[in-house]
Amino acid sequence: MSRFPVFPALSSTVLSVAALLALNLTPRAQAATSSPPRPEARLAEPVDWLPLGTQAWPSLLRIPDSCTYLVCPLVVVSHPRNQSAVRLRDSPTFRVLIDSLLESHFAVLLSGDGGPTTWGSPGALRDVGQAHADAVKRFAWNGNTYALGLSMGGLMALRSALPDGPYRVGGVALIDAWTDLRVAWGTSLSRRAEISAAYGTASEPPPTLDPQLLAFKAPYLPLFVAASLNDGTVPALTNGERLYPHAALGVSEFVSLSGPHLGANRFTRDMAQKLVGFYKRLEGRTAVK
């Protein structure tokens, strides 16, 4: 069985059958994540989500009704390992966060991230850049983009906000997120194999491609970091907690959580309101300027 999480990414020792059923996953489906990923079947899409990007791993855009008469910001969401935009869209658990963003007049782009195990790679970043460019043409965009990264998606979310990113990002939210590529490389042979394939190198990617090291050299970022010391998948001390001292003062927020990786308390209405509040603070700062 794969050591990696299937969304929400709880380890197999703590993920109950009831939790799996709530996410439309069976224990057999969970075990199947160790098999090579296949492109998802393109069946009839819900009419309120617009597919963008590649057929194999599409991104999905949802535009609030209010954006037909208001200019709106965009939140780009990067998914956990072995997940996809489609899986996030169809997860009742994650919809708590999505619905709160939409209700607060944020358009939401669930990024395909170029595939299920791209680990924030340059090729995947180019795919996200193209999806973003397509998305902002589809609604009355106010020019502001924010990032949200979950687990593996933290690498993509953070990298997109750094200098030389494909678009300007005004703030980054990270939930149980990887931010240090070197730590991910060193924690597991299977992670190492995936990172090697994603970055096209047999050796560890150079420091110039590590989002956390790049962030330490860049101007301070508005950050929302939610992490748990009980997380057995992503070490909080070397990822979110190590990054957070580089957060911009006045608008950033650290949420100390308990429990396992991507547990249920990450997807409550209270957490959703904290997340929305972070983005609204950044919107308010832009309005003042």
Image (tube, grey):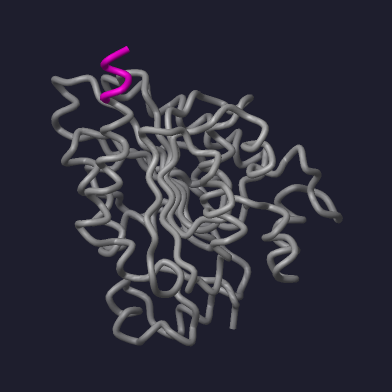
Taking the image as shown, residue 68 lies to the left or right of residue 254, namely left
Q: Residue at x 17, y 21 (%)?
A: 70
Residue positioned most to the top: 289
Q: Magenta includes 209?
A: no
Of residues 54 and 182, which is closer to you in this image?
182
Of residues 159 and 57, which is closer to you in this image?
159
- Name the image quarter holding residue 252: top left
Taking the image as shown, residue 244 lies to the left or right of residue 20, namely right
Q: Residue at x 60, y 75 (%)?
A: 34
**Relative to 184, residue 180 above or below:** above
- Name the image quarter holding residue 110: top left
Quadrant holding the C terminus: top left
The rendered magenta stretch, by its main secondary structure, is classed as: helix
Quadrant holding the N terminus: bottom right
Taking the image as shown, residue 240 lies to the left or right of residue 173, namely right
Of residues 93 and 162, which is closer to you in this image?
162
| Image position, residue 97 (x, y; %) | 27, 52
| Image position, residue 146 (x, y; %) | 40, 34
Magenta region: which residues? 284-289
> Visible in this render: residue 7?
no
